[in-house]
Amino acid sequence: MTAEVIDIKDFQSVRFFKTEVVCGWCGADTHGRVADRSEQVVCTSCEGVMLEINSGDYENVTTIIFSPEND
């Protein structure tokens, strides 16, 4: 088994929710975050999984487009 090692500065994540929501795991207000190539939205406070999508379940069915907020 081999693994790809990435530089920490290449690891990117983005905010998921436009307004804060309450995390069901820890009760914190969070925007959630999604890491590059991840299928999970996690809490920014406790890292609990708030939403998980298996892309294989939606292949050729669902498209999600992220746009910068200032557009």
Image: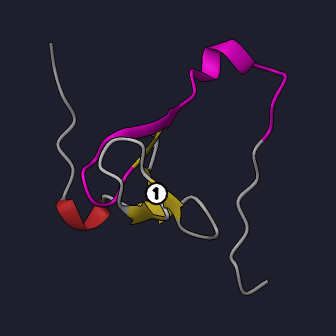
Relative to 12, residue 70 above or below? below
Q: Quadrant of the N terminus?
A: top left
Question: Viewer-proximal residue, 21 or 69?
Answer: 21
The magenta region covers 43-63
Q: Is residue 47 left or right of residue 68?
A: left
Relative to 66, residue 25 above or below? above
Q: Where is residue 20 in the image (x, y as percent from the top left)?
A: 54, 68
Q: Position of residue 70 (x, y in %)?
A: 72, 87
Magenta stretch prevailing secondary structure: loop
Q: Position of residue 37 (x, y in %)?
A: 46, 41
Determine the residue positioned at 46% across, 57% down: 32
In the image, residue 55 lies in the stretch drawn in magenta: yes
Determine the residue positioned at 35% across, 61% down: 28
Determine the residue positioned at 28% across, 47% down: 47
Q: Mark 1 points at which residue?
A: 32
Question: Viewer-proximal residue, 50 or 15?
Answer: 50
Determine the residue positioned at 61% across, 70% down: 19
Report if residue 1 is visible in the image. Answer: yes
Q: Is residue 5 left or right of residue 54?
A: left
